[in-house]
Amino acid sequence: MDRLLKYTSNVSALQFYQICRFAGVITLSIIYVKSALSTKDVSYIEFFLFSANLFSFFWSFGFKNAFLSYFPSLTREDQRKFTFTLFVLYVLFGLIAAAVLYTSIHQGILFNWDLTEQGFAPLLVIYLLCNTPTILVEHIFILHNDQRRLIQYAIFVFISPIFFTLVALLISVSIIAVFYGFLLFAGLKLLYLAYVLTIYSEFTIDRRYMLPYIAFAMPLICHALIGNGVEYVDGYLIRHYFDKESFAVFRYGARELPFVVLLVGALTTVLVPRAVNNASKTLVEIKQQTTKLMHFLFPLSIILVLFSPLIFPLVYSSDFKESAYLFNIYALIIISRILLPQVILFGHHLNHLLLSITASEFVLNVGLSLLLMQVWGMKGIAVASVIAFSLAKVAMIIYNRWRFGIRLSEYTSIPLYLGYSFLLIVSFVVSMSIS
């Protein structure tokens, strides 16, 4: 381990964590489908996770992103106090979210659930309360350059949910058993977070930080709500306009290439604090790191796009063949995902600008989804996401050029980018035409 850590940076450690987390998600989805659970049961499992995230993703992501840029500006003593204070904020907001979720379920405000679904409402609330604060673990390790613990935690995050799920299904082939496995995993993560806080925080609630931090994080919370909220609007559209089995089909296909979001997201997470302190040096690092990712992610995307119509029915079942077509459409998002103009905007604390761009993306995405699903069904929703996300990145690139004089070529290898993008589009056309 010590020899390995000599060659491990924050970027690679967080990317390893994200790979392990996503590999665990994919493995679990395969276990669900290959078990005796029905497609409807798998949809219930996906809807369980979807619902927990629906009521927590925006404020938890907003707090997390604000944490990355707020934390480096504090003194070492204040950092310890602030870390525990932030944990308390997560708990408080989690209690509010859990109360709203429970009320929404039983009053039928957002969901028309049948009796089977009503039965796991308390489990869903407990899962939200236990799981949401644990997003702090990996980011505490990143901000303290603790690659060793982050790698160890990544292995735990990969192995534990698979183990608990297999044990639960051996005891009882039911969705309730799976949900208890979720609760056990979330509870263990929460206990580990408590241990991490004993190392990197001081158990003191500093009220000086609460309101100012919430104000600082609010644009990022809104940014996360609008930016990532499209995923949940899409889920609502599938739930409302298609049958229950389609929910799992859409969720398994409506994912970008495994590791794209995770690897690029991990890189962004690490670069934002650096951009705050040294913007010019960060541009060079963005170009170097994204070039490395292009050589890995684009060839892998091209191969998977070509063979996905064969892979999905084999890995899952014939019921999930349409998931492959959705996956191919979402795979095109890498063309804009690999560009990182938002790091520059985060570095200049232009949170309100990011919010405005993301709000425009959200409106465009929802509007196009409602329009295109009338023509192409679930595929139309996927196409809408690709178009809206791409235009948002274009807006950020144009703003950076206009406001700061920063050209795209300063943080992106243009010839390599254009060549790989062309090859991916060709592979997409070939795959869709022969499948």
Image (tube, grey):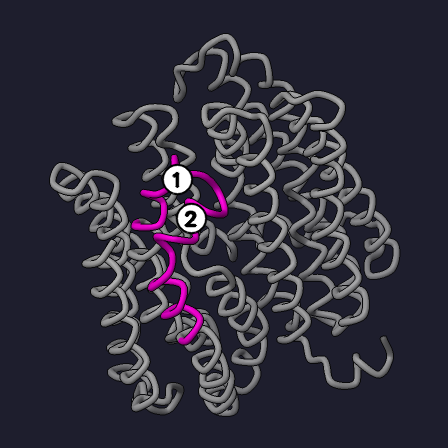
78 relative to 72 in the view: left or right: right
On the image, the x and y values in percent for residue 336 come to 32, 70
Q: Earlier in the sequence, mark 1 or mark 2?
A: 2
Residue under label 1, please give it: 320
Where the N terminus falls, by quadrant?
bottom right
Is the residue 398 above or below the residue 160 in the image?
A: below
On the image, the x and y values in percent for residue 285 come to 52, 87
Going 42% across and 13% down the picture, which residue do you hit?
Answer: 108
Q: CA distance from mark 1 to mark 2?
A: 6 Å
Amino acid at the residue labelled 1: Phe
Instruction: Pick the residue in front: 197 or 383.
Output: 383
Which mark is drawn over residue 312?
Answer: 2
Magenta residues span 299-325
Q: Is residue 309 magenta?
A: yes
Amino acid at the residue labelled 2: Phe
Q: Secondary structure at mark 2?
A: helix
Residue sitting at the far top: 115
Crowding at label 1, few (<14), some or many (≥20) Cα neighbours within 10 Å? many
Indicate the quadrant where residue 172 lies.
top right
Indicate the quadrant where residue 357 lies.
bottom left
